[in-house]
Image: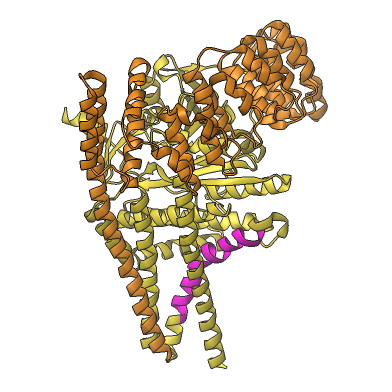
Chain colours: A orange, B yellow
Amino acid sequence: MSIKELLVLAIFIALAVLVLILLLMCFRLISAYFKTKYHKKLKAFVADVISEHLYGDIDEHHFLEIQRQMKQLGVDEKHPKRVELYVDLMIDAGGLFIGESHEKINLLYQKLPPYNFSYNRTKQRKWYNKAEGIREIYEMNQKQHAKHIIKFRNHKNIYVRREAQIGILIFMGWSSLRFLAYLKNTITLWQQIKIVEKLSDYYPEVEIEQLEKAINHPEITNSGIELLIRIIRKFNIEEYISFVIHQMQSEVYDVREVAISCLGSFDLTNEHLDQIKINFAAIPEDFHKILILEILSQYDIGSNKDFFKSQLTARDYMVKLTAAKHLWNSGFTGEVENHFSPILKQNIPA
Amino acid sequence: MADILFYIISFFFLIYGLSLLSWYFAFIILAKRSIKRNKRKEQFLEVEDISSATDIPTVSLIAPAFNEGKTIVSNVKSLLSIQYPFYELIVVNDGSSDDSLEKLISTFELESQSIQFFTESILTAEVRGLYKSKNPQYKQITVIDKANGGRADAINAGINFASSELVLCTDADCIIEQDAILKMVRPFLEETNREVIASGAGIGIVNDSEIKNGILKQLKVPKSYLTRVQVVEYIRAFLLGRMAWSRVNGLMLVSGAFGMFPRNRLVEVGGYDNKTVGEDFELCVRMRKHMEDLNLPYKLVYIPETLCWTESPSSWEIFAKQRDRWARGLWETLFNNREITFNSKYGKMGRIYLPFWWIYEFGAPIIEFLGLIIIIVFSIFGWINWEITLLLFLFAYILGCIFSTTAIYMYTKNFPHYNKFSQVGKLLIAAYLEPFLFHPIMLFAQIKGYYKKIFKIESGWGTMTRKGFDDDEDEEKAT
């Protein structure tokens, strides 16, 4: 084959590929149009079902009628994608309500098919089906599957185990801390925040004995401690501020960091401030020291003046300057000048 | 002898072209996987879950402004409308000679603050004043008035005053999606094994689109050919290039118009370098180098979604100036960090990523320019087989079309913008015409930028005039 023939062949192949991509794009645009149309239709159906259930006069016959309409819309076992979409819409709609209405919607979830759809999804091989199934179980309050999802809490896939952890929390409340604080894998910051938020949304009343049990458990993990610190902060549990201050000395960087960053949101007493000042010297990172100085600066600098003054001789210049800044801005300019003037005189040539 | 020279040169161009092609197709595969993975993960990382959390990191949004009096108020209002529980907006007036500062003071009821003692972590041009609002409605806003020092210097001043854990650098004239900060923060909360040192997201073009109160109401395909090609170019660069590099943690550039960084790391590396015009690329390279020197595992993350919208140059002159500047920025960054290239001490960055930038980003305009010269020389000597040459050009052209079409296809498949036949058609036509006008002018501008560097011709940022999203002004006129 000559170069020319080879090139012509290559051009034809490339053209064929280009046409194929263009056809795919056309198909994609057309199918997106119909999907959007169907999506709107289903959304309107879900809105009608929920509003009738919440505000209408309904009986058993009503549920049969809904099931018939669902079949008409093609929401059945033969069309799993449509069922997925329907479940998602139901969950989204349910999330808009709280209190009595939310309870009523939970009842609706139980009355309508597809029965066991979410449970069956958790048994599929693909991780995202499993994770989605677990999410549906807890979002639709299918308490009968609560035990089933506990076994996924240490699953090798991060998203499966995360959804299981949230599910455990929603079904078990504060007592779930006995699972969550000793998980095998590290809990990411995102997941910690999500757990804390869900706990606060679903169980706003603090159960001290459950927290106490988790804190004192000998097998508590580092990310478990981080999680507990965040819970203490979110619920502003003053009795455990000392626990947070104690964690400033943790050997683990992340634990130290969470403890220090959380201290800023508490209303600290003089005893707490003294404890922090004692722990300060043992903190290895200058960055953390600066953070602590920023926290202490929110309190009366006058009563902590000696501590700030002692930091003017710190090894790190940013720690030194941060201490100087707070002293200066609180009116202790003389202290800063007295400290820095001899140094400046030494360094400025005559 | 002439024959040998001919074959050597032809072989060199062939190898270069084929290797570039291979990279491009590798990008498509990597980007496709990356987008798919991202989409699946996103289902379980909904920003609503943490939008009301008290535990999320604080963010400072730093927006430098220079002579943007015409649009500054609506732009700042747009930036203030972003949803994030803990963020402060720092607008840095970089020595504007127009009425930007006065407009900000009167609209947002700003009052001067005494700076007293201030620890300036990064040295900048003189800060003349600091303003905060009396009105609780605008409590997030801080305005820094400083002497002119350029964009990098202005951002550095913002970093100095930022009191947050994360810093989002943007431009005052960018339109940012409402939930953009929540999405940008997500990678920082997600990673456990490596420290995320930067996150970036897609940037889109909004020329000729409908904007109301600083919010993008309806995205339209720009009317002019120039801006339309830039839409395709942005889609290709962000969706394919950056997504692919992000997949292998090889991202070397987070766009200056929209990038988030941990403040402490920014301070450690001394912030942006105000001596280069490619400060965003330079910063990323320096941050990576810093982490390699510290021997700490790190990651740069890219979010495929378009979270920031901006206006692109709509005149050829401004476009050429922009590309000239980008070329100089690339030159400066690569030469300033040349010790990293092929240095195994810097791991893959030294062995693969930076060499790629040298060979294919920096080298491409040079190779292309040389190619043109060689075609002229060879045709004078009658060494060119025109039939084969034209077939080769046609082949290369179709491959370019495949690449652009794939990028547009992937974009329409994964994102809701440009989902009408007419919009896609316009973008495809622009993409197919790109090599005939857009590309030669871009090449000319790049070579001009290199020429300035070779002959040490001083040239700064140049003026980037924008039309502005003046919907408010239009309204005022109408009333």
Q: Residue furthest left?
A: B479
Residue placed at 50% from the left, 69% from the top? B22
The reply, left or right, for residue A47 in relation to residue B172 is left
Residue A197, percent across and down? 51, 23
Residue located at (73% from left, 44% from top): B294
Q: Quadrant of the C terminus of chain B?
A: top left
Task: Find residue B233 and report its image quarter.
Answer: bottom left
Residue at 48 percent of width and 17 percent of height:
B112
Task: Work out whether residue A13 can be spotted.
Answer: yes
| Image position of A310 (left or right of B122) | right
Q: Position of residue B320 (x, y in %)?
A: 39, 57
Q: What stretch of residues is rendered in magenta?
A: B350-374
Q: Is residue B2 above or below residue B178?
A: below
Q: Nearer the viewer, residue B142 or A79?
A: A79
Q: Is residue B358 magenta?
A: yes
Residue beneath the point at 41% across and 33% down: B179
Query: In the image, is residue A336 part of the stretch drawn in magenta?
Result: no
Q: In this orientation, which residue lies closer to the viewer: B30 or A7? A: B30
For residue B192, above or below residue B289: above
Name the spot of residue B99 as percent of width and height, x first: 37, 29
What predominant SS class does the magenta segment belong to?
Answer: helix
Q: Position of residue B62 (x, y in %)?
A: 49, 33
